[in-house]
Amino acid sequence: MLPRQAPFQNRTLNGEGAASGTFIAAKELTTPRICDPAAPQVRDGSAAHRSMGPNRASLLGVANAAPHSAFDRSIQPPLTLMHVGLLRSAAARPHVLERLWPLLVASLTAVVLFTCQHLYFELQSAREDAADDAASILALVHHVDEGHWPGATVVDVLREASAGFDRVMSATYCHSAHCLSESRGSAPDCESGRDWLSVCVTAADDKSTASLTVRYSLVEVYLEALRAIAFFVLVLLIAAATQATASRRLRARLSSAETDLRRAATLDALTHLLNRSAFEMAVRAVNDRASADARSWTLMYLDLDGFKDINDHHGHTVGDVVLKEVADRLRSAVPDSALLGRFGGDKFALALCASTDRPAIERQAQRLMEIVSRPIDLETGSVSMGLSIGVAESITAEQPFGEALRRADLALYEAKHAGRGRLRYFDQAMSRHASDRYELLDALKAAIERKQFFLEYQPQVDVDGQLRGVEALARWRHPTRGMIRPDLFIAAAEQSGWMGPLGLLLLELACTDLQACRGSGTCIPYVSVNISPKQLADPSFVSVLCNVVERHGLTSRDVELEVTEGSLMDAATSEDAVRRLAALGFRIAIDDFGTGYSSLSRLHRLPVHKLKIDRAFVGQLEGDRVGTSIVESILALADRLGLKTVAEGVETREQSLWLKEAGCTLIQGYYYARPMARERLIDWIQDRRFARGDDAPAPVWSETLPGEAMKR
């Protein structure tokens, strides 16, 4: 292995951060045989799951497997500032404990010095006690000499003194060059020489030449000093042993904590796959190896289809179980030579190096889609999901990881946009489209604030050609890009969260224009406004809508709301909003009916007034039996449910006649009128009225009638 890399600034998922002071250098981790053509390719999923341990576990730092990587490079797992702080504080403790050893030695030295000092003072005290004992014995001898104790001799006094005084070992009485000596047992007298276990002290009589010398024992003094030293040494030994044990335990805990922290900094906590930072560092190592071997590699970006619905319906606990199961399945379906990681949420990344040709990539993608789509059994039942994959291929060492991920993400976006459960390869057109989307999102807010949006209106007429209402169609004239397609800026507003302000602006414009038309004497029964799912999900939408309508002097009968099938079927909040709006008198029309998905039972329960037949079906009325059958079925369904119908995209007389005969209530399309601005709409209505010879305007609102009634 190469030498350990230099300490680094710690990188987190959301950015980079540096801890103050010294940085913690990460452990070297061995890596699997990525980009190694000799690496075994997995054919059996279960075998892959069992065999991934030695290779991938070494990369993740889960096991101490022998190094066998094709590129020898230490991968330093990124540590967050929290991890660095914990490691630094824990690492400081053994350092403090190591400094206790000098402290223990200093304490022992202090104890010895203190004991020596104490011994010195005890010896001085013992000498004073010996002098007092010698003076007492000499006083007794004087009493005998003076005859105070009849029958007693000096020898008797000396013998009794040696036996009665505990520490007096011998006593020698001298008077006029004559000396008498008595000792306890075989104890030597003071004339025998010095002895470190005793001290000789002489007491003299100032009135005579008599003196008394005693040998005083110091054994008790030394024993007391030794006991004190033994006690302190025992305490220090116990402290040292406790310190050593605590130090070993703390080092073990620190080592385990460091391993756990590095694992947490390297692995995703839920799935135990590589997290984004560790995946990026491993890919950088792949790039280094690829540069040396002139190889390229492939990045696959994976996203689960339908996972949010599982989270919303079953809760995040079940969602975590599903993610762990998906991670295990992905782990079992990728080769040992690949890198697999989780980037948060339901997104995963896979780096392939052994096979980068498209057939191999597509086989791998198909296997991943197949294994993820299998039902997952839960306690409450089973759930199923799909998998969308974006691929950035032919990545070389010169391309940074961020660029590779951007390309794979763009391809994934196209796969999701194409209907999910798809595989898409990155191409440069995706970059241009992404740049356009970004510019569009950037300009959208300013366009709303500057009111660059306006409305065009397309009439809705009955089968006799009489005006029954108009649909308001949003338009955006960009200062530099010109007219922006509605499907582009509506989708951008939905994604960016600006649909609420944009919808409110369009509603204000529609009500203003309707009031202006009526003020000019032009009869427009109602205006139909498209409502997005985001608006329906907003709890304040109903009250905001009512305020706008009332502020312009209109009623709920003057505004019709068009919603899509999906917005009605997806969320309970949308259904509740529709019921509240219908209760207030607003008419509800389902736009582009038949192009989404519907629950007929829910459709029957909801207060819907109209079904709008999509232009795709209307365009198939001439010469297409399938298209004709679909329109007939929708008309029959609406008739049975008591709903009115509006056919969109009517462009020919034949289509208009067929719809009239089939019982369609209203018709909308280029055959009658193209979308037009408010001023042009007023002129169009006036021209048609005078062309028909109408002397007076029709009432502002006349109820549309079912097809059969209109025929009669």
Image (cartoon, grey):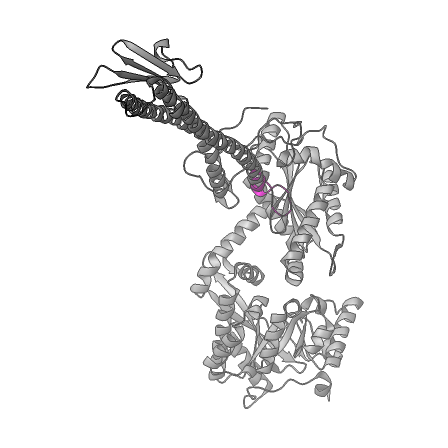
Q: Is residue 9 visible?
A: no
Looking at the image, residue 424 lies above or below residue 642? above
Most foreground residue, 682 or 534: 534
Quadrant including the N terminus: top right
Residue 65 figure quarter: top right
Instruction: Report whether 19 appears left or right of 122.
Output: right
Looking at the image, residue 258 lies above or below residue 130? below
Q: Residue furthest left?
A: 207
Most foreground residue, 223 or 606: 223
How far across and down, in percent of the image, does residue 331 sit? 70, 42
Quadrant including the C terminus: bottom right
- Is residue 344 covered in magenta? no
Residue range of the region highlighted in magenta in the rendering: 262-277
Instruction: Report whether 169 appears left or right of 466.
Output: left
Residue 460 figure quarter: bottom right
Q: How many marks?
A: 0
Looking at the image, residue 96 lies above or below residue 589? above
Most foreground residue, 406 or 529: 406
Instruction: Report whether 184 appears left or right of 571.
Output: left
Q: Which residue lies furthest to the front in this view?
A: 150
- Is residue 276 covered in magenta? yes
Q: Is residue 589 visible?
A: yes
How far across and down, in percent of the image, does residue 464 sit? 66, 83
Residue 690 figure quarter: bottom right
How far across and down, in percent of the image, does residue 250 sit? 53, 36
Looking at the image, residue 244 lies above or below residue 462? above
How far across and down, in percent of the image, does residue 258 sit? 55, 37
Q: Measuring 63% from the left and 34% from the top, which residue is drawn there? A: 59
Most foreground residue, 109 or 710: 109
